[in-house]
Amino acid sequence: MIIEKIEEKLQNVLESCGYELPAKIIPSNRKDLCDYQFDGSFSYAKVLHKSPIEISESIVEMWGSIYKDDPDFKKIEAVKPGFINFTLSDKFINETLNKMNEEPKFGIKMPKKETIVIDYGGPNIAKPLHVGHLRSAIVGESIKRILEYFDYNVISDVHLGDYGLQIGQVIYGLKQENIVLEDITIEILDRIYPEMSALCKSDEKIKEECAQITKELQDGNQEYQEYFEKIKEVSLKDIKRIYDYLDVHFDYWFGEADSYKYIPKLTEELENKKLLKLSEGAKIIDVKKDTDELEIPPLIYQKQNGAYLYGTTDLATIYQRMNDYHPNKILYVTDLRQALHFKQVFRVCEKLGYTKETSFEHLGFGTVNGSDGKPYKTRAGSAPKLDTLFKETKEAFLASNPKNDAMDESDLDILVNAIIKFADLQNNREKDYIFDINKFSTVIGKTGPYILYTYLRINSILEKEQYIITCLDNQIYNETDRELRIKLLELENTLKYSLDTRLPSVLANYLYEICVNMNAFYEKNHINNLEDRNKKENWLLLLTLANKILKEMLELLSIKIPKKM
Ligand code: ARG
């Protein structure tokens, strides 16, 4: 809102100067000098054979003649070596904050409505949810909520991994132990999967046999279908319990198995377009392009034994989504290591002509690592189950502050969520990060507890004090006050950027910055004992707005606020 408004004027000024320069301004990182900066003169200096400062001076001069005594600015000046510094007027800052306060969703402009499918979560039936599944759930949920905030028509689908090799292995294991359907429990599944997975790694024959079971299941074998249904039921119940704990929700719980009914139609389409090729008995689709720097292998559509693969079910699922929802976009939130897979799948979509109607994005994320920089493992050497992670996080939080013992269970669960989610979401999703429960659980630093503590601290003042004003007046009282107000103005731009880049980390870091400003403000300005009534009311209103922003934005990170901590 603010930046756009300034950029619009700048555009006008640049055109009047005859400069072909992008009117791009950035928030200043020296808030003591100015609020926003323009640094375009540097790149243009060579073109014009002039010094950057000369160019900037001419822009400022033109600005002055077009927008005489512009009430939006306190100061616009060209400074050496060639920046233009913009300082907003108090009036403009306060008027904008008042608008944010009055309007729903802080007056943020909404983009045009589109339908977007988001595919995240991706848990696998029969395997316990572990730390490797955390990011897809947390990052995906946040991206979904940001899209929904901007009024997109969002359709979320968990895309269960239910027809993969693991299912054949587990069925084999169950049969080996003569476990009948009624006796299958989550404990049994949790035990059998790792055992079978290890066995298949050491015994090629058993591995083959398990693959055969998966294949026959896919072909409709009655007995295996019954096992599959039961395993899915038991497994899903547990998966849903964990997603509920994480406050992660899906519109659809479709799985790979559900996509099988679309395979015949899809195959027909691929055959009509002559895209399927035979290679050593398997059906493959070539996806490489002449412009590729690295060779992209073909997508394997159907194996020699007739079995379908991960790429096939993804394509069949796209077929269903295209037909049922006609989405403008389909987004996939998975581990970055699946980048090649999605590249292949999207290229097939291009060949099928789907990309004319729909665009596809793979939103990859990095790994959760241990202190050794390798994927996070328990002492026993396996990826920790999410249940274990929640329990350890709760213990670490309680240990960090004995007072927390007094918190009720539901508040503690909110804290566990906040700790894990904020730790994850503050990292750029494409980067790996080190899981350090002790660091994440303290109230000091860039942590979930710090954000929640700030909110509650301010909230307790607001609950005690009364105020009647509904609009901020035209004053700003001191530096920390100004910094907080300017920070709140950045909301729309920040959120928009977070939306466009699909990076919840942009929003998470912004919330942290707001909290830093709020705490600095609170420590400097002793609002409780303030005699000046007008000032006090203005500050209470400002803090109310700050807390309202925090609360509404925390929801987009799927972080709730405890009653107390
Ligand atoms: N189940 C997959 C896995 O564990 C993730 C599924 C992601 N979504 C998709 N449409 N392929 O790796």
Image: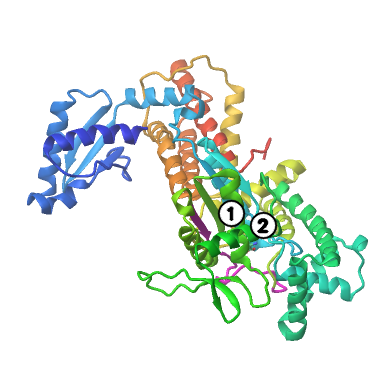
Q: Is residue 155 left or right of residue 43?
A: right
Residue shown at the point (82%, 58%) measured from the top left: 229
Question: Where is residue 238 drawn, in percent x and y?
Answer: 78, 55
Q: Which range of residues does the magenta coloring cover?
A: 360-381
379 is within the stretch colored magenta:
yes
Q: Is residue 559 left or right of residue 286?
A: right
Mark 1 vs ligand 1: CB under 8 Å?
Answer: no
Q: Quadrant of residue 407?
A: top right
Q: Main secondary structure of the magenta part?
A: loop
Amino acid at pointer 2: Ser
Name the residue at the top extreme.
468
Mark 1 lies on residue: 319
Label 1 near label 2: C-beta < 8 Å? yes
35 or 321: which is nearer to us? 321
Q: Quadrant of residue 9?
A: top left
Can residue 441 be seen? no
Q: Please give the count of numbered marks on the rendered protein.
A: 2
Q: Is residue 452 left or right of residue 44?
A: right
Mark 2 lies on residue: 259
Amino acid at pointer 1: Tyr
Name the residue at the left extreme.
49
Local packing at callout 1 (Cα closer than 10 Å; few below 14, some 14-19, many 20+) is: some
218 or 29: which is nearer to us? 218
Q: Quadrant of residue 460?
A: top right
Q: Quadrant of the N terminus?
A: top left
420 or 109: which is nearer to us? 109
Residue shown at the point (33%, 45%) measured from the top left: 29
Local packing at callout 2 (Cα closer than 10 Å; few below 14, some 14-19, many 20+) is: some
Residue shown at the point (60%, 67%) measured from the top left: 370
Question: Where is residue 121 drawn, in percent x and y?
Answer: 64, 54
